[in-house]
Image (spheres, helix red, strand yellow):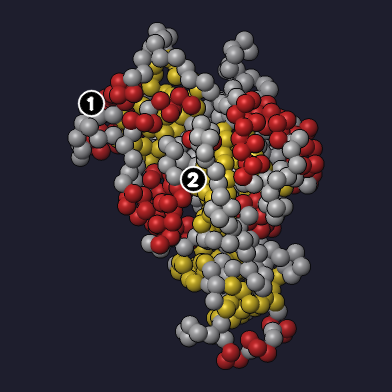
Amino acid sequence: MDSSKPIRIEHAAILTEDPSNPHADTMVIDGERIAWVGWADELPQTYAGDACEAVDMDGTRVIPGFIDAHMHAVMLADYSRQISALPPAINSIAELIEAIREQRAHQDADTWIHGWGYDEALLAEGRSPNRYDLDTASDGAPVCMMRTCGHIRCVNSRALEIAGITRDTPDPEGGQIERDENGEPTGVLKETARDLVTPFIPRASEQDTVTGLVDLGHLLASQGIVAATDMCTLDGTDAQPLLAKAAEAGLAQDMATYILWDYVKDDPTYAIAPKQQDRSRQLFCAGIKLLTDGSVSGKTAWFDTPYLGSEPADADACGFPTCTEEELDDAIAFCEANRCQLSLHAMGTRAIDRVLDHAAGHAPWCDGTYPHVRIEHVTAPSPRAIRTLVDTGIGVVTQPIFAYAEIGTYLANLGIDRTRTCYPFRTMLDAGVNLCISTDAPATSWAVPSDPFPNIKSAVTRHAYNGVDFGQDERLSIEEAIALYTREAARMVGFEGLGMLRAGYKASFAVLDRDILAVPADELDRVQVVCTYIRGKKAFER
């Protein structure tokens, strides 16, 4: 192919996500950008005949590349080298113990053993692992297993000893050290308590992380993902320089990063310069993230109704907040001053209402091309919260894959009636909420957590992986789900030139092996990407 010529994609079934020109069969790529898109009989003479290198798609479906507006790229790349405590590899605590034992056989007692993804609802024993389970296989080595939600760690006795956690250690603000009937720590550390061991866990080398990020980029390209985020690291690692080096080494995706407020709130000199926020660059810093509650599966998301199996008199029967009122106000003030976006993790009804009470009174401080505040997950918003979201333009980034993959935990913790009202996609979209969908990979119980297609299937069918109906009234159409994963996701983060196939936009798109608009809804997770272009270059071909 003559690289000096524009490329003409022809005989394609193009879904542009451009409301002014929603469908087309021809697209011209000149360098990194789209020069023209439309119907063949309207093609300008400039791009006809030998003026372009022609690529015949033979009717294949082409869509804008997916944008994962809530992912933890550095964590996901790191987890790929750890024990995956997910089906089908691990289905029980017994199998997890065996995997730890196998890894311990190849390392010494001073080397930490890491794993991720466990979910007690998916384990045969129906409970979380504890320190004593991990002790049986670790032979003196410290072990740390991250729960699927990313908010809970289970560590063994050696790790507790290294971190100095005993029965006398008080719960940190916004967290819990789970204890047995005798008051001894079980090894399960919830919310901010998980950070008690963070300083003692060795970090991967920079080169290993960069290599992992490049490998992750190849995986994302194979899934049609052309842009993603790093929503924060849990150990304070600055993702910006790591992603910059990964981009130099071949990471093709556009990337936006967010910084966890916990790691900058005490630094009065910290600022995010306008240059760092320049959204015309492949990599930019979008803003700050603050965790305001926990997860449904960990019973730490903050609701207004107790979890099933909780004693109403229990102070934490409804979950609990993980930040103070002052922290909320300080984070808002910082983002106003720095003109950067504020991301607020809020799953439970009380947490959502609370963050809106703090944020809604502030006029938008960004330039209007993306929301100044975005709320992550929004599992169970109140009617008042939905009205406030519409009135303020505050964005919502939600994850259909959660209930799809974690249905057992949702049913156990909330019951079927409450579960069916969770993640009210239809209600929010019809009301006019500024909404997009994402995966939160790797913080979900799915073997390949970044895969867009099970996520879309969940939004469209509202059936969990095992067939359980979790709310048919809240279904989306396939077209709506794709729009929320492309055009609206780009707007949510502020990715320039992405989300639509339109003249002047980046030539970042995916070619699918079947027509996703015509596939039966229960087969959406079987759709595969044939090839992916990122900024005009083929980044993947199956």
Secondary element under disc 1, as helix, strand or loop, is loop
The 10 Å Cα crowd at callout 2, few under 14, some 14 to 19, many 20 or more, is many
In the rendered image, which quarter is residue 65 located in? Answer: bottom right
> In the displayed image of the protein, which residue is found farthest to the top?
182
Q: Judge from the rendering whether residue 49 lies leftward or rightward of residue 104; answer left or right.
A: right
* Residue nearest the viewer, comparing 232 with 122: 232
What percent of the width, then of the height, locates residue 511?
55, 68
Q: Secondary structure at mark 2?
A: loop
Can I make out residue 35 in this image?
yes
Q: Is residue 197 above or below residue 528?
A: above
Q: Residue furthest bottom?
A: 50
* Point 61% across, 38% down: residue: 334
Number of other residues with Cα within 10 Å of mark 1, as a class: few under 14, some 14 to 19, many 20 or more: some
The correct choice, above or below, for 306 with respect to 327 in the image is above
**Which residue in the rendered view is the most extreme toward the front?**
269
C-alpha span from label 2 to label 1: 31 Å
Residue nearest the observer in this picture, 178 or 230: 230
Task: Name the amino acid, label 2.
Answer: His
Query: Can residue 433 be seen by looking at this rendering?
Result: no
The residue type indicated by label 1 comes to Gly
Residue 197 position by quadrant: top left
Q: Residue at x 62, y 26 (%)?
A: 326
The circle on residue 389 is none
Q: Check disc 1 and report the residue beneath it.
A: 140
**Most foreground residue, 431 or 424:** 431
Residue 20: x and y in percent read 76, 68
For the C terminus, the quadrant is bottom left
Earlier along the polypeptide chain: callout 2 or callout 1?
Answer: 2
- Disc 2: which residue: 72
